[in-house]
Image (cartoon, grey):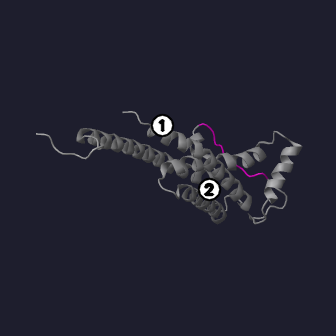
Amino acid sequence: MVRNRRIGSPPRSRQKSSQTRAQRKADQLNVWRLLAKLCLGLYILALFFTFSFKWIPFLHPLANLQLKPLPLQDTPPLNLVPGRSIAQYWLSLRSDPLHHTSLLNLLGNIVAFVPLGLVMPLSLAGNLAYLRSFLTGLLLTLSIELTQLLLAVGVWDIDDILLNLTGVVLGLVLSIPVKFFLVKKLYRNKP
């Protein structure tokens, strides 16, 4: 006995296998997102600890490495003028191109936050992933600066916030082709 089925619809066995394949792809994507969230959480903790307390814990057994701010002329406990400390660090670099503290401050504040902007959109689903990633970067850098101010560990500096957000935005821009490539590779029509 032949059952009636609609013309053009695939047999049930093919429907079931395509649903199973789609489910496997979705599960695979969820595993990647979970792994990215775990790595991101550990990274955020390390970033907060390192920048808030000016101490790099994983290097401590090897050396007592502390991040020390460059002594700037008449440095107040907080800088609310955008560009002031960037200009001073830049002048310091121009006079001595190998001045490690200036280079570490300028590039370090940017490079340290690139992974946050790169990995966070990959770990989030939905249309607001990039906005949520940017806001997370903003909240993280504000909490770091506030901790520095309250504990008198460093200088609350608007330029640090701007440099950190530059790193987040750079990471977000880099994550666009990475996300496109990963999704395209994951959802390629292979069995």
The residue under the point 29% across, 44% down is 9
Magenta span: chief secondary structure = loop
Residue 161 numbered tag: none
User: How much space separates mark 2 and mark 1, taking CA atoms?
Assistant: 39 Å
Residue furthest to the right: 95
Q: Mark 2 or 1, which is nearer the eye? A: 1
**The magenta segment:** 62-70
Bin the neighbour count of mark 2 within 10 Å (Cα to Cα): few under 14, some 14-19, many 20 and up: many
Residue 185 numbered tag: 1
Q: Label 2: which residue? A: 52
Percent position (x, y) of residue 92?
A: 85, 48
Q: Is residue 34 visible?
A: yes
- Magenta stretch containing residue 67, yes or no? yes
The residue under the point 64% across, 42% down is 64
Please give left or right for residue 172 compared with residue 128 in the image: right
Bin the neighbour count of mark 1 within 10 Å (Cα to Cα): few under 14, some 14-19, many 20 and up: few
Q: Amino acid at mark 1?
A: Lys
Res. 5 image quadrant: top left
